[in-house]
Image (cartoon, rainbow, N blue to C red):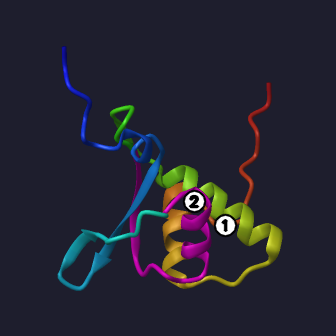
Amino acid sequence: MSSPSIIPTDRLDRDFYIVLEDLRNGAAFRETDDGLDYHTLITDLLSGQYGNVLRVVVFNPHEGWSRDASEDIARELERHVSRLGLTIADSLTDFIEGQLGRKIGVQLPLPLA
């Protein structure tokens, strides 16, 4: 019979987001607090709390997975910028446009069937 785990799995059964930034001395994942969820991340990015964002990674320790969420985050940021008419830093614009492969707000034509 195994003993119960001393690791509180209820706190680990959620998605965590970390941001890879381009800093002066190279790229690094920035230290975040325990509360960095999806909505907080979007708000923090739009308010300029991150400098030169390279990637956004999401992971769930309880479920044992991680993935690059950069494109998903860029799409959500574009929706906020367009819908609210926000002015954002050039570095965030570069991140969004780099992930989407186009300028913010430009719709690509649909192929004809």
Is 42 in the magenta? yes
| Up/down of 15 relative to 24, above or below | above
Image quadrant where one finds the N terminus: top left
- Percent position of residue 13, x then y: 44, 40
Task: Name the mark on residue 39.
Answer: none
Boundaries of the magenta span: 36-59
Is residue 24 left or right of 90 when viewed as pictured?
Answer: left
| Residue at the outermost top position | 1
Query: Does residue 48 appear in this view?
Result: yes
Sequence order check: which comes first, mark 1 or mark 2?
2
Q: Residue at x 71, y 50 (%)?
A: 108
Is residue 37 magenta-colored? yes
The foreground one among 76 and 1 is 1
Q: Amino acid at mark 1?
A: Ile
Residue 104 image label: 1
Mark 1 closeness class: few <14, some 14–19, many ≥20 residues within 10 Å: some
101 to 62, vertically: above or below: below
Question: Which residue is rendered at x = 80% and y = 24% of the image?
Answer: 113
Left or right of 106? Residue 9 is: left
* Crowding near the residue tagged with mark 2, few <14, some 14–19, many ≥20 C-alpha atoms within 10 Å: many
At 43% from the left and 41% from the top, the residue drawn is 10
Distance (Cα) linking label 1 and label 2? 10 Å
Residue 28 image point, x, y percent: 25, 70
Q: Residue at x 26, y 29 (%)?
A: 4
Residue at disc 1, secondary structure: loop
As drawn, the label of residue 74 is: 2
Kind of residue at badge 2: Ala
Q: 111 and 30: which one is in front?
A: 30
Which of discs 1 and 2 lies nearer the camera? The answer is 2
Visible residue check, residue 101: no
Q: Is residue 99 above or below residue 92?
A: above
Q: Nearer the viewer, residue 75 or 37?
A: 37
